[in-house]
Image (cartoon, grey):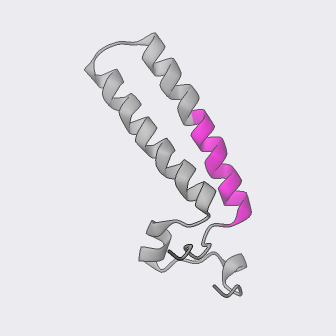
Amino acid sequence: MRRPVLNITPPERVGRVVVVLAAILAGALLLTSTSGLLAIALDILLAMAGADLAVTGALGHCPLYRSLGYTPASLEHRTP
């Protein structure tokens, strides 16, 4: 299996990790401070968004970027 081409810059990868950590903290606070169906639904959405950001940040590849044909200018000169 071939590794996907990098299409996320290093600063964006770090940013994604920071957002994941914030989502984890927000999810934990949400679960401990409120109860009910809305809180659980929001916590699940935060977890799913955090998982996506964690995976794309770790791999350095965003499938949405590829689908949209977006490549950051700093990565355009790289070859796969």
The quadrant of the picture occupied by the C terminus is bottom right
**Residue ID at (46%, 20%):** 30
Residue 5 placement (x, y as % from top left)? 58, 76
Image point (62%, 67%), residue name: 8
Q: Nearer the viewer, residue 79 or 38?
A: 79
User: Over which residues does the magenta segment extend?
Assistant: 9-22
Against 48, residue 72 (above or below) is below
Q: Quadrant of residue 40?
A: top left
Note whether 70 is above or below 64 in the view shown.
Answer: below
Determine if the magenta segment contains residue 10: yes
**What x and y, as percent, mark residue 52?**
48, 51
Residue 71 in the image: state x and y as whole percent: 58, 78
Q: Main secondary structure of the magenta part?
A: helix
Choose between 2 and 27: the one closer to the eye: 2
The residue at 66%/57% (across/down) is 13
| Residue 40 lies in the magenta-colored region | no
The residue lying at 37 percent from left, 33 percent from top is 44
